[in-house]
């Protein structure tokens, strides 16, 4: 049978509970033993002995392991002691009847309703027993009042006391439950909560507060904030906060403590940073009950903020130390926010002269208007980046040729926060490129004239070979072949220089691409046959295309020439034409040596040649495909390439049917916009 949470012998202080009974028995024994009392000594000794036995049993027996009802036997046994004492003094005249109240009170304070009812009934039995022994007719009439009064009085007192005790227990249980709930709620939040009473003694602390403090606040720590567990300092981490300056002490005085930062030094661990709020706790009648403090641990946040500041400082030092580049930060509206040393050196403005101004002041008047710059900012915001080469104005009115990169900056939520603008002076680079282009143009022109004469005289000699030996004819043929090769190279160099200068204009007209393709295949067929390569044309039904037939023919010639050159004997070269949407597609594929993957991105650089071509000593200078890409892009077309080493290469050209008239420019060839570079 289970034991209960309440009982006459449950809980601490069991020995103290029997002291009233033991004391009453001893007093009664002494009183009844005095001269002049007619007592039954044997009965008195039995009462005293029973009291001793019950006292030993109360202390030594493990009552918590016994059923609850067993504990009620001890108060009932003390009723027997009261009965023996009453009998020893003479039941009809004894004043010891009041002793029955003590067991009833015991059970009322610590027992259950059932135990109390049984004890009250036992008290009635104590008074009824003499009547049963003597007989009702012989029992003194004056004693009937006691027989009725004392049990009734014991029942009333026991019931009232037990009810008060039950109500007190219920309130204590509710208070304990509320306290548990409150502590659980407080421990579930990440804000440190500490509370003290009106005297400044700590009454409450949650897990977050213990984590900040490093221990449970004890003693006067709540008010002093300087207990054994931790010490409190001002935001500087040096000035201690003690006594009346403590946040809770100030709150108890009615001061407002709101969002103040403090430093907490636990007994173990590093300094913690916290933002605190304190408030006084009062009753409805205005009486102060205490104060509560909420502590938000901002240690990690402050460390992160300091790390950001350190990073920004390092970046600022790096940017300021960069003198060859102007590095600016622009707001979303294009106004200058930062100005580094390089910007000051390149453009001549001091920081306080330019910060807050629109970036348009850095461009020459009349060349770039505010609307153009706003359009460039919009493109950078949309695409993430915008780059160009243009003229930039200095403070003194002079200009320089610059490379400008405009990059959009977004926050983690994707909102535009501004732009970075990096400018580099390209004046010397542009001058060097112009000098190189002029040199190539001059050299190409000067070489072309004598080469034309050489080829003309060679043709005259080869027209009449009757007076020449076979060896002489072979020598002249070799000279003629290499002269034509050199003439093509000079032509490529000259065309490259003209494209860079923007002096070549496309002669746009309606062109049948199939006719151009057939002519290109026919021109390349002899060389393919000599190299034992199968050259095939796969024509399609194509609409006419607006293009420059000479330049487009040059593209086909170069692609077929490369395909044959880089395909071993027994291989195959295919030229395929297809109509696709509002344009046409041209594909030249081969089964040649292919291009390594790590080199495909470099193929459109001038004079670059793949390692597969260099390793096999295949002649070439690396200009042909650069020219191809430039011509294709001048036609508003795209050029792409796919290749696998040892498998072959495919070039794909996509051209629109219609396009505006424009000049050729090779500037885009230096920075290909799409696709890998050709060989």
Image: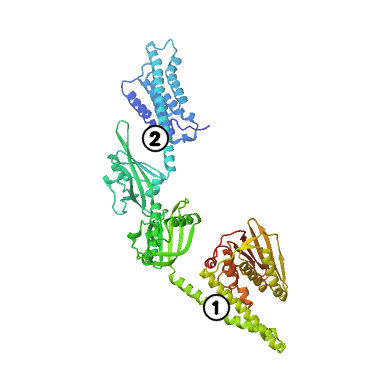
Q: In this view, does 556 lie above or below 135?
A: below
Q: In which quarter of the image is the C terminus?
A: bottom right
At horizontal 42% and vertical 38% (from top left) the residue drawn is 182
Q: Is residue 42 visible?
A: no
Q: Can residue 113 be seen in this view?
A: yes
Residue that protrudes farthest toward the top in the picture: 137
**Can you tell which of label 1 and label 2 is closer to the viewer?**
1
Residue ID for mark 1: 445
Coordinates of residue 144 in the picture (x, y in percent)? 39, 13
Residue ID for mark 2: 13
Q: Residues within 10 Å of mark 1 (few under 14, many from 20)?
A: some
First reached walking from the N terminus: tag 1 or tag 2? 2
Seen from the viewer's position, the closer of residues 166 and 129 is 166
Coordinates of residue 235 in the picture (x, y in percent)? 32, 51
How far, Cα to Cα, is label 1 from label 2? 121 Å
At horizontal 40% and vertical 32% (from top left) the residue drawn is 172
Q: Is mark 1 on a helix, strand or loop?
A: helix
Q: In this view, does 471 lie to the left or right of 414?
A: right
Coordinates of residue 429 in the picture (x, y in percent)? 46, 71
Q: Is residue 632 left or right of residue 357?
A: right
Q: In this view, does 513 lie above or below 150?
A: below
Q: Residues within 10 Å of mark 2 (few under 14, many from 20)?
A: few
The quadrant in which residue 675 appears is: bottom right
Q: In this view, does 587 lie above or below 49?
A: below
Seen from the viewer's position, the closer of residues 159 and 454 is 454
Seen from the viewer's position, the closer of residues 256 and 65 is 256
Seen from the viewer's position, the closer of residues 245 and 329 is 329
Coordinates of residue 440 in the picture (x, y in percent)? 52, 76
The quadrant in which residue 128 appears is: top left
């Amino acid at each position: 049978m289970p034991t209960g949470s309440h009982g006459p012998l449950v809980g601490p202080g069991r020995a103290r509970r029997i002291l009233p009974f033991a004391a009453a028995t001893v007093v009664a024994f002494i009183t009844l033993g005095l001269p002049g009392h007619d007592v039954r000594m044997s009965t008195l000794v039995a009462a005293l002995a029973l009291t001793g036995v019950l006292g030993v049993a109360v202390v030594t027996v493990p009552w918590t392991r016994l059923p609850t009802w067993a504990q009620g036997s001890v108060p009932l046994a003390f009723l027997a002691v009261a009965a023996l004492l009453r009998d020893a003094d003479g039941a009809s005249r004894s004043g010891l009847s009041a002793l029955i109240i003590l067991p009833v009170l015991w059970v009322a304070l610590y027992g259950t309703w059932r135990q109390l009812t049984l004890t009250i009934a036992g008290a009635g039995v104590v008074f009824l027993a003499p009547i049963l022994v003597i007989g009702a007719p012989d029992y003194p009439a004056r004693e009937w009042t006691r027989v009725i009064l004392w049990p009734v009085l014991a029942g009333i007192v026991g019931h009232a006391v037990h009810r008060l005790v039950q109500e007190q227990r219920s309130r204590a249980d509710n208070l304990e439950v509320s306290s548990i709930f409150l502590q659980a709620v407080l421990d579930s939040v990440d804000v440190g909560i500490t509370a003290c009473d009106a005297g400044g003694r700590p009454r409450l602390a949650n897990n977050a507060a213990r984590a900040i403090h490093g221990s449970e606040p004890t003693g006067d720590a709540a008010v002093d904030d300087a207990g054994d567990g931790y010490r409190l300092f001002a935001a500087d981490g040096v000035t201690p906060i003690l006594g009346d300056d403590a946040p809770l002490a100030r709150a108890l005085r009615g001061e407002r403590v709101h969002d103040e930062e403090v430093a907490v030094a636990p007994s173990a661990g590093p300094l913690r940073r916290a933002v605190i709020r304190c408030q006084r706790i009062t009753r409805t009648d205005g009486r102060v009950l205490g104060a509560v403090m909420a502590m938000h641990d901002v240690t990690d946040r402050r460390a992160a903020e300091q790390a950001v500041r350190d990073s920004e400082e390092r970046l600022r030092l790096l940017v300021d130390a960069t003198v060859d580049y102007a590095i600016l930060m622009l707001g979303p509206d294009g106004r200058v926010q930062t100005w580094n040393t390089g910007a000051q050196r390149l453009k001549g403005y001091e920081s306080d002269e330019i910060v807050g101004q629109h970036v348009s002041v850095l461009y020459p008047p009349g060349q770039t208007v505010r609307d153009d710059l706003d359009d460039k900012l919009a493109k950078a915001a949309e695409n993430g980046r915008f780059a160009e080469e243009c003229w930039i104005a200095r403070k003194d009115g002079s200009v320089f040729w610059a490379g400008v990169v405009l990059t959009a900056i977004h926050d983690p939520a994707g909102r535009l926060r501004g732009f970075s603008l990096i400018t580099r002076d390209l004046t010397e680079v542009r001058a060097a490129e112009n000098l190189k282009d002029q040199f190539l143009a001059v050299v190409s022109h000067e070489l072309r004239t004598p080469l034309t004469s050489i080829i003309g005289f060679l043709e005259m000699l080869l027209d009449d070979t009757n007076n020449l030996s076979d060896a002489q004819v072979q020598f002249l043929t070799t000279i003629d072949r290499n002269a034509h090769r050199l003439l093509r190279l000079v032509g490529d160099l000259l065309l490259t220089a003209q494209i860079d200068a923007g002096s070549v204009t496309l002669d746009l007209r309606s062109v049948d691409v199939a006719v151009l393709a057939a002519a290109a295949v026919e021109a390349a067929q002899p060389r393919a046959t000599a190299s034992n390569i199968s050259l095939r044309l796969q024509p399609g039904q194509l609409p006419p295309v607006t293009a420059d037939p000479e330049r487009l023919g040059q593209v086909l010639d170069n692609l077929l020439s490369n395909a044959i050159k880089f395909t071993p004997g027994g291989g195959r070269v295919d030229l395929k034409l297809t109509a696709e949407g509002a344009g046409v597609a041209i594909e030249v594929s081969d089964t040649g040596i292919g291009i390594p993957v790590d080199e495909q991105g470099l193929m459109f650089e001038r004079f670059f040649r793949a390692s597969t071509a260099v390793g096999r000593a295949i002649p070439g200078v690396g200009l042909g495909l650069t020219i191809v890409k430039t011509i294709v892009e001048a036609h508003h077309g795209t050029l792409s390439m796919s290749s696998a080493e040892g498998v072959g290469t495919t070039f794909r050209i996509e051209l629109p049917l219609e396009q505006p008239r424009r000049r050729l420019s090779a500037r885009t060839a230096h920075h290909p916009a799409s696709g890998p570079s050709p060989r």
